[in-house]
Image (cartoon, rainbow, N blue to C red):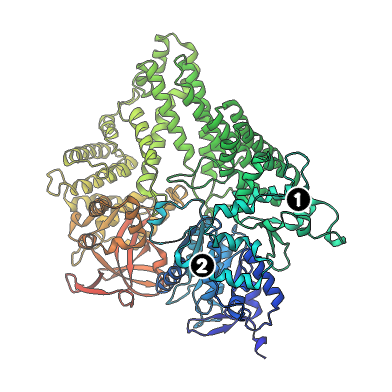
Amino acid sequence: MAHNKGSSLSNARGRESYVGSQIRDSISLLDVLYANAFEEEDIDSAVAKKTEVDFYRGAPPQWLNFCWAEKATSADKTTTFIKRDGYTELIENIKKQCKGDLTSTMNLLYEPGSGGTTLAKQVLWDMRKTLRCAVLTGPTSDITAIAKEVILLFTAGGKGHQNTVLLLLEDERILENLQDAIIKEIAKRNIVTHRPVVIILNCVRKAVIKQEDHNKSRHVILRMELSEAEKQQFEEKQIEISRSYSNEHKQFHGFNIMRENISGDYVKETCALSGDVRKNRRPKNSQVLAFLSLVNAYVPGSHLLQSHCQAFLGPPDPIYGGPSFEQRMEPFTHLIVTFPARQGQDKHVRMAHPLIAQQCVKVLATAGVTRSDTARNFLTEFCREQVQQFLVQDMLTKREMGEERKDTFSRLIQDIEGEESKRNVVSVLQLASEKFKQNPFFPQNLARFLYIETRAYFKAEKWAKIAKDRDAKSSFVADTLGQVYKNNLKSRVHDPSISAQEILQLSNKAFEAFRDEERAAENEQGADMQDDGMTKVSRIFNNRGLFGYLQVANIVFDSLVSLDNTWQKVLTMEISADTFFLSIRQKKLFKYKPLIINLRDEVERKCEFFDSYLSYSKPSMKKDEPHYFQTDVKNCYCKYVGTCTPIHSESAIDVPLQKLKEEMAIAFPGLLCCLDKGYDKTHLRQITILWEEIKNEWEKKKDGGGENKAAQNFILANIILSKVDAASPVLTPLPILRGILERHLLANFGNQTPEFYVLVLLLFWPEEHKKMGFHVDLNKCVLEMQESYKNTYKKHLRSRYLRPLIFLGKGEGLSRLVHRAKLEKLLARENKMTRPDTIDQKWSSGEVWREPSVQDLLLPVNGVVRQHRVFACVDGKEIEVCADQRRKVWKSGDVCFYLGFTIRGPVAYGIHYPSHHRHVFYSGMMTGGSLVHFWK
């Protein structure tokens, strides 16, 4: 019999593959929508109608809703399920992605209550016959487990029956990690495919959709207002509904709000509460209404469990013959919806619509039941189980993303402060801190509120320390104490009566707090770097301790120098602290001598960290560091380091070194950024001469470490100078530069810095039909470089995008090396009328590699992909390189790309498969007849 075949999934041949219970039983984190969903079932019309009523009232859509809309045909049912305007755009975009990369993402942006989840599920339902559709419903803590289930769904049915997974995701925080985990799983299992493995439909709920969101082409936006065509659809559906549900349709608030074009008047009329909502001695059901309103207004999409609500209402329980939950919630029942979760789980309860929740919060506040009253009541009377902790945490601590950074506090905290008082905010956060005694985030946010909004620094210090004690290993929690001290110092230095001793006393606390944070951050490991189960895991390296230290150092310098200009010479170690303290007769300052004499060196060390951190990486391919970040680091460096030679310097090379510090060209990353800073040829000539002088001095000393570093910087200085003055007499000929590297390679091939290997790759990368006198095993060099990167930078740069430093261009010798600044300036000049984030979008989408000006500059390189690994084919050899975007590496075969170099090694950018039907390629001949492909 047909119904015994079980569930089926669509396959690549346009047919269906039946999957056994083993697949179904192995997938627990995904709600899989099978291709033959409901087809073999006799649907109970009463159940279907109840599901339909729940949906119209405001419950989230169930798969049965879409099925019933298709199946049910009668004189009363004449219209189809309403398709919002974004529907066609989503379908078309998904079809385009089906011809795209190994994994891809599409964003659906919507405001709460506008029907975003409904639209997304409708798309999944309509594509279930062509793609393998699923919704991520399980916990998101184990990303690897989710990735494995996605791959299992893709491969179900065996080879030849694989098919792309369309995955609905409603947690954008895990998006990047999930994509990485899926790609790793594909490579691990060596999956060979000619189609995408997964297309992620990322549903992003935003309180306000801004103009910048409309400017991003990869977004589909569902607007709160209806178009004329949508209004017509809703009117036709309304006629049908009123015939089918003549007695109920007036309470179909989910549908009616949309039909009324999300009308504020309809919501106000609906929420004219007739029950008892007074502040004192309120009935339990009105309190439940208040809880639901607050929760749904400030955590859209959330819910409470019906069993918890019934427990709060108290006896008699429906199990023992008491009235139902819906009956006990009268006269508010029409404002709430209950709906089943997964099979066998407790029912969920929520308000019928986010706008109804928001309006009820306002009505209750007008009646004297404020937001803080409800929050406190919820904490003391309802939150009896840990399961509510995360809901409360979202309400009180989750911040919305603003124009450039997150809001300072959660929306609820901001509204309590704006509509009520700061005192009420403090009382709510304090109660949450006391209620959940292990949770560090409530005292942390209380401390933040106290120092930012009330400037009660001593109270803030107390709560910041409590938060730190609750999670002693978290650097992010530790940061708050440093911020309290820093802001206290910042507020006090404007007091004209403040003394140097007070400044140093306050700053000493801040410095120590940020040092603690830095130590905690150093001990935190990435998920793939974990040593044991006790190690604190953090996806990103927290740089706030290092940065906070420099911010405090800036404040200390400016405030002390404003008291007495001589402090500038003391802080830069130009004169001794002892001499100065005695001259001003301030013996009390001697206790701060260790702080003062170490401050310049500490600042220099931290600035060196940021020099490489900011030069070699950025937060993501699409996002740059905030502008103030670079400014604060640079200002601090200039104040303490880039002004004069400290008194303890005696070596002959200290003077040229100090000159290089003043030019901020003292280290490899600083030199690399000279072109970003706009240094002219005069500047760069002087820097190159200084590095030659230092290199020669180190060679005389025969100090291996110093000589090696000086040699590296001298070679890089030549490369940078050649970019602005290719004919400069200061330039050292390429064979001599190679000879310097040869000497160090022969002395020690392994155990070098990543910067050393960058130079080896740049200078010894094969040129067509040009033989070098010295042979370098570049594959071995790449492996050594990756190991060196792992030991030197991986901990700090984990999760960040590694910036290309140099590209391989057309030409020969040093002229073939193209600095990334040249590309960036080229793009900025050609796109001067567009926003900066548009250029970032071009990088991330790969459009940049199709720019004619970029193609004219860079050299296309032939390569090959095997088992998800990319190799450059040069001079008869294959050299393994990394793929800039691993999702582009979707099958084995010949490829073409541009070659760049990051601090981790050579990288293939703009990978294309010349034979693939999606692209039109033009062939050209390089010198010597090797075929290359480039794209238009």
Secondary structure category for the residue under label 2: helix
Q: Which residue is mark 1?
A: 285
Q: Is residue 293 above or below residue 597?
A: below
Q: Within 10 Å of the Cα at label 2, are there few (<14), some (14-19), or many (20+) other Cα atoms?
A: some
Q: Is residue 760 left or right of residue 592?
A: left
Q: Is residue 545 above or below residue 14?
A: above
| C-beta proximity under 8 Å, tags 1 and 2 | no
Amino acid type of the residue tagged 1 in the rendering = Asn
Q: Is residue 35 above or below residue 806?
A: below
Q: Is residue 577 left or right of residue 475?
A: left
Please identify the quarter of the rendering in which residue 456 is found: top right
Q: Position of residue 530 (x, y in %)?
A: 56, 53
Q: Position of residue 521 (x, y in %)?
A: 52, 42
Amino acid type of the residue tagged 2 in the rendering = Glu
Q: Nearer the viewer, residue 383 or 901?
A: 383
Q: Nearer the viewer, residue 696 or 38?
A: 38
User: How much space separates mark 1 and mark 2, taking CA atoms?
Assistant: 50 Å
Q: Residue at x 24, y 55 (%)?
A: 763
Secondary structure category for the residue under label 1: helix
Q: Is residue 934 left or right of residue 412?
A: left
Q: Within 10 Å of the Cα at label 1, are there few (<14), some (14-19), or many (20+) other Cα atoms?
A: many
Q: Position of residue 6 (x, y in %)?
A: 65, 83
Q: Residue at x 75, y 47 (%)?
A: 384
Q: Nearer the viewer, residue 214 or 484?
A: 214
Q: Is residue 412 above or below residue 104?
A: above
Q: Which mark is residue 185?
A: 2
